[in-house]
Amino acid sequence: QVTFQSYMFYSEHMAYLRRLANDYPQIVTLDKIGESYEGRDLLLIHISSGPSDISKPVIFIDAGIHCREWISPPVALYIIQQLVENPENSYLYQNVDWYILPSLNPDGYEYTQTHNRLWRKNRRLTAGAECYGTDLNRNFDYMWMFDGASQDSCTEIYAGPEAFSEPETQALRNWFLNNTELNIKLYLTFHSYGEMMLYPWGYARVLPENFEELHRVGELAANAIGQATRINSNYLVNSSAILLYPAAGGSDDWVKAIAGVDLAYCVELPDGDAPFFFMLPARQILPVVQETFEGVKAFHSYIEETY
Ligand code: 0X9
Ligand code: ZN
């Protein structure tokens, strides 16, 4: 049973998804979209009221791109738990389909539990490189290497030898390119920390044409979290290059620009009621996942009302 009282292993994340697929076959399907470099499954859960109706709006969520940001996978797993196992929330998947990938960098996540708590990148050694790991959130092929990314493998923002050089980013790209018939309306990627609702563009301080909608909808979610918070979370909403820093090659920019998803957000989750940075204490997992779910419900009602 998943109680959100402690951090779980990657193997436990996957075991939970497999149990749900087994126990709720009418609404849950599991899809292996690829493997990490070290051979771990990248599992995507699809939650739907069924008969597949490809015109339904879709919400796509991923987590765990940066493996030291431990609060990210639990947020995704809590959304999954609330959708699938809490009957009060079944309205959330009547008119909207959900695809959720809770752990996109499992090799790195395992490494943070066994070797180095603050590891950020994946665990592949680029041929000829000096240091291990590519920053998966610099490896997507939109304005790759334009700014805020490095070709030095020993930095934390190494973008890889070329765009989409990594099996983990390739898996996400291939899934989007193989599912262009889906009506994907919202993309959320969970990171930490900072309490920020970030929208494109990330590569430079320029704004997409629908920035007003991105800003307004981001504020709906941020306000919902602010109403619910028990740890004084206070989200800011803006483009990631303006509010945080320019950084090209992120998943959010690629999903918006190339996969064509109008609404894309990088959610920088809280670090708790004191500055715990990436090391949010286990006792604060539950308040964070609960308040974030309120934000996700606000996103959902906008999608449901608008499309
Ligand atoms: O730098 C990042 O990849 C993200 N911040 S983090 O502290 N979690 O590493 C922000 C990414 C925002 N999106 C883009 N720059 N595209
Ligand atoms: Zn991150």
Image (cartoon, helix red, strand yellow):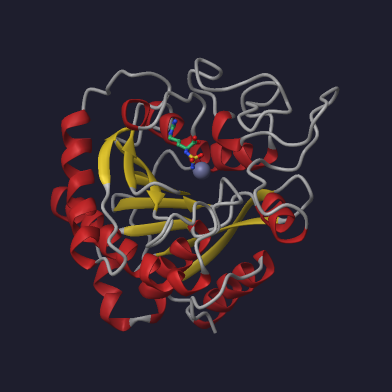
Q: Of residues 26 and 276, which is closer to you in this image?
A: 276
Residue 111 position by quadrant: bottom right
Indicate the position of residue 195 as horizontal and vertical percent values: 34, 49
Residue 256 image-quadrant placement: top left
Task: Evaluate whether residue 307 shows in this view.
Answer: no
- Image position, residue 35 (x, y; %): 70, 50
Nearer to me, 68 or 82: 68
Q: 241 and 43: which one is in front?
A: 241
Q: Work out whether 152 lies above or below 278.
A: above
Q: Nearer the viewer, residue 4 or 22?
A: 4
Decide: is 163 above or below 4: above
Quadrant of the image occupied by residue 156: top right
Q: Is residue 212 left or right of residue 245?
A: left
**Residue drawn 63% across the image and 29% down it:** 164
Q: Identify whether 184 is placed above or below 212.
A: below
- The extreme top residue here reads 146
Question: Which quarter of the image is occupied by the N terminus?
Answer: bottom right
Q: Residue 11 at x, y = what percent?
A: 69, 68
Q: Residue at x 33, y 61 (%)?
A: 292
**Does residue 78 appear anywhere in the picture?**
yes
**Quick check: 103 left or right of 152?**
left
Tell me how many marks there are: 0
Q: Position of residue 286 (x, y in %)?
A: 41, 73
Tell me what residue is drawn at x 54 percent, y 20 percent: 144
Q: Residue furthest front?
A: 274
